[in-house]
Structure formats: structure tokens, C-alpha cells
Amino acid sequence: MRFRPAGLMALLLLGGSALQALAAPCPAETFEETVIGCTEMIKMQRMDEEVLSRAHYNRGYALQGLGRNKEAIADFTNAIRFNPRNAAAYNNRGYLTAMSGNLDGALRDFNKAIELDPTLIQAFNNRAMLFKTRNQWDKAIADYDAAIRLKDPKASVVYFNRGVAYQNKGDADQAIADYGEAIKLDGKEVNSLSNRGVLYAGKGDMDKAMADFDEALRRDPRNVQALVNRGFTLYRQGNFNRAIADYDAAIAIEPRIARIFQNRAEAYEKKGDLVRALADANAALALDPRDKSAAALRTRLQAATKPAN
């Protein structure tokens, strides 16, 4: 049984958080209209290379918004061809290149974007996320430091992500501090509360841990991470009925996470309800047949429930 700290926040999925947009030429109200307008301008070929670069860039941005990523990458490449100092095009191409799985190519683009524009916050955030996928925590933290210095308007998200990096690095105190900043900046933030609660529990401060989980669930009653983490804290306190109630709620929301079934199985085992415990161990293994701890739990429960000869 273990806590489930929230993963990396989806900082860089779409729009302004990850991609840098430009204004004219060819602005429009919708992505579809932008593609049409920019295509007409590009066909004219009667503009200087700077304007042509921006037309390709804006069409690429709109194409990405429409999910046409390969075409978008081609447009960002053309934007760079017409203006090799277009830092935003490097950043956006890097983002989509990373999404395609080519992390080395993405890193080259993010590095170039930052070289051309050391104030481009999106590039620092994107490169930090890439470093996180490689468990290069110090490099990720350095990029988040830069984003904070540059006064990222989404500072609460940056503090959360830097907190995750510190947490994975093993620096609980700094992670707690960063989660605290994220909570202070965003009154709706939940994942920082859940992760900070995990760290408080790890320090043995169950009161602070429970307070964070309770507040997270007050803000978002359907937050699975917080439900599981509070359930585990209750389990450690010997409150098995309440722990099971939290696991029940988590499973009702997300029924395909093996770890939650295993946690509930162990709580049932502590209560002496071995039949339900075994059913949950079986469910955990059905979802994740390679989980050795769940297999060991099932073996133990099978032996305990085996009828005597």
C-alpha cells in the first residue's frame, strides 16, 4: 500500500501555456478562418520574409489547434526558414516534436528558442517538462526558476511543477514550500494540497496531512488522488471503515486503477473481512497482472481463506 502523489499537471497541452501565438497577419476568430486567411496570404508570395514567416507561424498555430500536427510542424519549419530568428516557431515546433516522441529534436528546438529569446517563458516551461520526462530534476528546476523570475502569469502551475520536481528529487521541505506557494496563488488548486499532504504524512504529521486532504476534497470532491491519499492516511491511523469509504468513492470515479483495489483489499484484511479483501486483490491483479505486491497479497489471502482439511 502506498500514497498516490498527483502526477505532473497538464501545463502544456494546448494554447497559450505551451504555444506562443502571434498577432497579424491573417488573424481571425476561429482556427479554421485563420488557416484560410493565412493560406491566401501565403499563396500571394508578395510580402517580405518576416511577414511570410509570421503567416506560416499563425497558420501552424491554427493547424495545431485543429489537431493537424504534422501540417503545423511543416508550417513552423517554414516560419523558421523565412525568419531564422523566430523563437516562437522553434518553441512551438519543439512542443509538437516532443508530442510525437522525438525528445532529442524537441530539446534542440527549445534550446534554440531560449537562445534567441531568453524571455520566452513557454520555452522554459516546455524544456522543464522534457527534463522531467528524463528524470533530470535539477535541470527542470533551473528552468522553472527562470519561468518564475520572468513572472509567468501561470505562476501557480510553475510552482506546482517545480514542487513535483523537488518531491521526486527527495527534497520534501522545498517541495512543501512550492506547493504552499501554488496554493496561495490559486484558491482552486487541489493537486498541490494532495501532494503536500503526502509529504506531511511522510514526515509523520498526520494532522497537517489530513487537513490538506480534507481541503483538497472540499475544493474538488471527485479528486481521486486526494481520496486515495486520505484513505491511506486513515488506514495508517487504524480507521479502516473510513479508509474503505474513501477507496469506495475513488473506485466509483475511476474503476481501472489497480492500486486502489489493493489498498482497499488491505483495509478489508485489517478488518478481518478476508472474502472482500480477496475479491479486491483479484480485481487489482485483473487490472495489473504484473503487480508483484498484489500477487503476494492474493497468495496470503488465499491461504487465509482456504478451508481447513
Image (cartoon, helix red, strand yellow):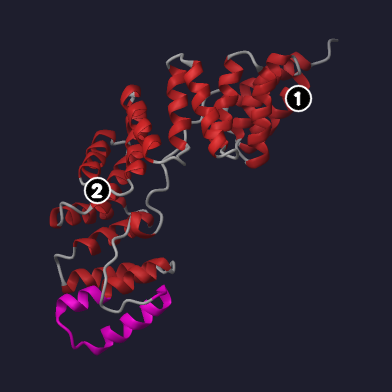
Residue 38 belongs to magenta span: yes
SS assignment at label 2? helix
Q: Is residue 283 left or right of residue 223?
A: right
Q: If the image is split into quadrants, where does the C terminus sit?
A: top right
Give x and y (percent) for residue 276: 76, 24
Q: Nearer the viewer, residue 29 or 2?
A: 29
Number of the label disc, if any, that sits on residue 276: 1
Query: From the viewer's perspective, is residue 178 above or below residue 158?
Result: above
Amino acid carrying label 1: it is Arg
Number of marks present in the image shown: 2
Give the residue displayed 40% in from the left and 41% down from the top.
186
The residue under label 2 is 124
* C-alpha distance separating marks 2 and 1: 49 Å
Query: From the viewer's perspective, is residue 97 above or below residue 282?
Result: below
Amino acid carrying label 2: it is Phe
Give the residue displayed 33% in from the left and 38% down from the top.
159
The part of the chain drawn in magenta is: 29-55
SS assignment at label 1? helix
Q: Nearer the viewer, residue 70 or 85?
A: 85
Mark 1 nearby-residue class (10 Å; few <14, some 14–19, many ≥20) = some
